[in-house]
Amino acid sequence: MPRPGKPEPRSLLEDQPVIASDRIPARDRSKPVTEADVWALLDEVKDPEVPAVSVVELGMVRRIAEEGGEWVVDVTPTYSGCPATEMIEDSIEEALQLAGIRNGRIRRVLTPAWTTDWITEEGRRKLQEFGIAPPVGSSSKLTLKGVEEVITCPHCGSDHTERVSEFGSTACKALYRCLDCREPFDYFKCI
Amino acid sequence: MSKTMTQQEALQEYLLRLADSDMILGQRLCELCGKAPALEEEMALMNVALDLVGQARNWYEYAAELIDDGRSADELAFRRDAHDYRNALMVEQPNGDYAVTMGRQFFFDAWHYFTIAALTKAPDERIASIAAKAAKEVQYHLRRSSEWVKRFGDGTEESHQRMQTAVDDLWRFTGEMIEADEVEQTLFKAGIGPDPEQLVADWKGLVNEVLAEATLTPPPEDAWMYRGAKVGHHTEHLGFILAEMQFLQRAYPDAKTW
C-alpha cells in the first residue's frame, strides 16, 4: 500500500555535509520535518526478528503526527510478550535521533489490536522473498476452530505443504514443510 | 472479603488474579525449556509462556497504577509472597507428564478464552485494549491445547489412560477457577468481565464437547473442589515456584545489569 506523500528514497550521503549514520538515510536538515520524512525514516527500521521487513511494512506504526511540538509515533506491538517490542521502540527512537529529530515520542497503542491484515503488499512480497510464507486469508474470518488454509511454499511455490507445528522460531510464526521441494519454512501466522 | 468492597478494590484484586495466573502458568511452562518431548513442542510451549508473561505484564502495570502505593509491576510480580498471590490453583500444579501439562493448559485456556472475550467489552478502555490483544493469542492457545487433549484421548490405549488420569486429577482445581466470588460479581455488575453463570455454562459446554470428542469420561458433576486461591490459600507448590522465580529480584533488589 503506497502511502501518499511518501518521498522517493534518497541516496545516502548525497549533498550531506556530515555522515549521520551508516544505516539511516540522512535527512536534509535545512528543511523542516514533515510527516512524510518520519514515515520514510521509520520505513528503514527493521523488525530484529524478521529483518526483511520494516516496522511500517509490518503495520506496527499506526500513526505519526505532530502534537504540541512533539513528533508522536503510535506503535502497536504484534504480540503481548513479543521480546522485540522494546528493541523496536528503541530502534525507532534511535532513527529519529540520528535524523536530528529530538522531539520524538513513542506511544504504545494496544487497541485496535495488531493484525496480520495490516502487513502491506510490499511487506508480504519481502517476507516471501526472505523465505517466510506471508499470512493467508483475513484474521477477521478466523473462528475458534480455525480453518486449515492452503499455505504456499515460499521456496518452490508448491501448494503441497504440511504444518509441522503451530509455533515457529518466534511468536508470530508457525513451522511448515514443503512436501515437494522438502524444504522446511516459516509461515507468518494469520492473527 | 468485607461487604463494603468498592468497585476499585474489586478491580485491583481482579487484575492481580489475571496477572498472577498468567505469570505462574508462564513460569511453569518455562520449566520445560530444554526438556520438552520434541523440539516443536518446546517452541510452542515457550511461545505460549511468552504470550502469558506479556499479558501478565500488561495487567500488572495497570494494577500497579491503580494500587498506587509506589510498587511497580515488577515489584508486584517479584516481591509478593504466596499468601498475596491470587492465581488459580490449576496453574500452579506441576507439569507432570505431557497429558497433565496439556490438560492443565486446556482447562485454563477454556476459562481464559471466555474471560478474555468478555473483558474485550469492558467499559474500562485499558482493560478492553489489553484483552483485545490477548484474545487473539488465547484463541490460538485454546485451539492447540484442545487438539492435544483430543489426540491423547483418542490416541493409543496408554495415551488415553494417561489423559483420563490427568483430567481426573486436575478436575478438583476447576471449580474455584470458573466460579465467581464477590470480586467477580461486583465487577460484572459494573460491566467488567463475564456473566458468572454464562462463564460456567460456556466453560462446561466447551470442556464437555472436547472431552467427548477425545473419548474421555468427564468427572462427576458433584466432584469435590479445592478452594482458597482467591484469598491466598494455595497448594504447597506455589512457594517453590516463587522461590525460583523471585530469587534474583529478592537477592539483588532492582538489579539492572545482567
Image (cartoon, rainbow, N blue to C red):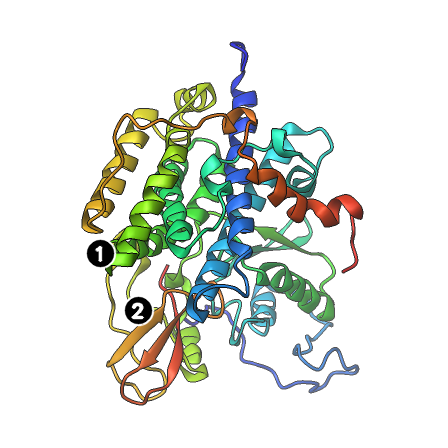
Q: Where does residue A47 sit, x and y in percent of width and height?
A: 55, 70
Residue B152 appears in the rendering: no
Along the horizontal axis of the image, is A150 left or right of A23?
Answer: left
**Which quadrant of the rendered structure holds the N terminus of chain A?**
bottom left
Residue B75 vertical placement versus B54 (above, below): above
Both marks 1 and 2 on one chain: no
Disc 1 vs disc 2: which is toward the camera? Answer: 1
Which label belongs to residue B103? Answer: none
Along the horizontal axis of the image, is B2 left or right of B186?
Answer: right
The residue positioned 67% from the left and 69% from the top of the image is A95
Q: Determine the image quadrant of residue B237.
A: top right
Residue A113 appears in the rendering: yes
Q: Chain of mark 2?
A: A
Residue linked to disc 1: B154
Residue linked to disc 2: A136
Residue B166 vertical placement versus B31 (above, below): above
Along the horizontal axis of the image, is A145 left or right of B5?
Answer: left
Along the horizontal axis of the image, is A47 left or right of B77?
Answer: left
Q: Where does residue A108 sit, x and y in percent of width and height?
A: 57, 51
Say what amino acid the circle numbered 2 marks: Val
**Which quadrant of the rendered structure holds the C terminus of chain A?**
bottom left
Disc 2 on helix, strand or loop? loop
Q: CA distance from mark 1 to mark 2?
A: 30 Å
Q: Where does residue B167 sit, x and y in percent of width and height?
A: 33, 43
The residue positioned 58% from the left and 60% from the top of the image is A83
Pick whichever, B152 or B66, lies toward us.
B152
Badge 1 crowding class, 10 Å Cα cut-off, few under 14, some 14 to 19, many 20 or more, is: some
So how many labels did they put on this image? 2
Say what amino acid the circle numbered 1 marks: Asp
Disc 1 on helix, strand or loop? loop
Badge 2 crowding class, 10 Å Cα cut-off, few under 14, some 14 to 19, many 20 or more, is: some
